[in-house]
Image (cartoon, rainbow, N blue to C red):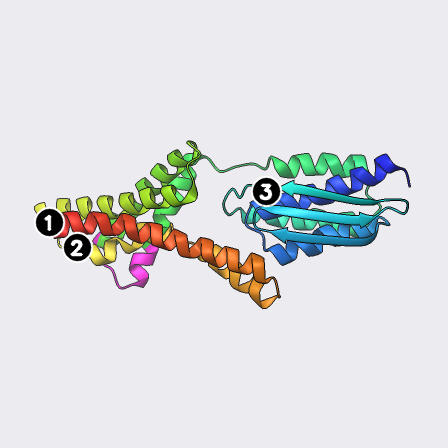
Amino acid sequence: MESIEIKRIIKIAMKTGRLMLQNGGETYRVEDTVKRMSESRGLKEVSVFVIPTGIIFSADLGIETFTGLERVNPEGIDLESIDRSNNFARQFTSTDMSLDEAEKRLSEIENPPKFSKLIRVLGSGFGGGFFVLMFGGSAIEFLLAYIASSMTIYITDTIDSKHLNFFIRNIIGGFAAALLSLLFVKAASVLMISASIEKVIVGPLMTLVPGVSLTNGIRDLISGELLAGSAKIMEALFIAIALAFGVGVILQFFMA
């Protein structure tokens, strides 16, 4: 096997792993995927080490050992991208897919169709609103939470374009969730409509809670990925602290 072909195989495997990891895939799944893809094309003694922000790869090429590093910047949770990447990896390992076709498929996976910002905002509103109903909220509280959740996601999406770090982003998110919920409940009370701030605020907050990061961290720990699992759990913890700080500032200021 020529050196150029080997490097193309490694690049395809690493890129697949990067797409899975940056969209919220578990580290143990990424390690297994990159390793299987490489070994399916004849590479020997493949070692893959994954942390939430990078992939380290090593393989024996016969006369030399190849080692590579792929830096990963997490972009949030995109289950469709993870599923598409996972399906591609299975096809790559189980068929005689050419490298040209694999590179073309990866380019398509890297730029998947996206929901419009309006759909994201409206969908997030329903997500937040139905959480209020789960906690025993009324129809009015559902409506208020729906509007607050939609506006909160609009604000956090706008912040994402500024490339702020995740801690500041979630402080602002918690701040917005609490402020909007409080304002809408106050506006409802002016119209003689009763609504509980404790229930309304649940909606926008649940759209920001790092449930996937926490779940992935626990799954990584169970799978023996102690470093990656601990990092994911710490990330979820700091997001929760940031949200609590943002909410606490608003509640302390307006409800003291």
Q: Nearer the viewer, mark 1 or mark 3?
A: 3
Of residues 75 and 151, the one nearer the viewer is 75
Of residues 24 and 171, the one nearer the viewer is 171
**Is tag 2's residue or tag 1's residue first in the polypeptide sequence?**
1
Question: Measuring 71% from the left and 46% from the top, which residue is drawn there?
Answer: 88
Q: Nearer the viewer, mark 3 or mark 2?
A: 3
Mark 2 — residue?
195
CA gap between label 3 and label 2 equals 44 Å
Tag 3: residue type? Val
CA gap between label 2 and label 1 equals 7 Å
For the residues bearing labels 2 and 1, Cβ distance under 8 angstroms: yes
Residue 161 shown left or right of residue 61 in the figure: left
Tag 1: residue type? Ser
Q: Write the start and end of the magenta stretch as one range.
A: 130-140
Mark 3 — residue?
72
Residue 165 shown left or right of residue 256 in the figure: right
**Is tag 3's residue or tag 2's residue first in the polypeptide sequence?**
3
As helix, strand or loop, the secondary structure at mark 1 comes to helix
As helix, strand or loop, the secondary structure at mark 3 comes to loop
Q: Residue furthest bottom?
A: 222
Tag 2: residue type? Ala
Q: Is residue 128 visible?
A: no
Question: Measuring 57% from the left and 44% from the top, which residue is drawn there?
Answer: 22
Q: Is residue 155 visible?
A: yes
Callout 3 crowding tier (Cα within 10 Å): few <14, some 14–19, many ≥20: some
Name the disc covering residue 189, or none. Answer: 1
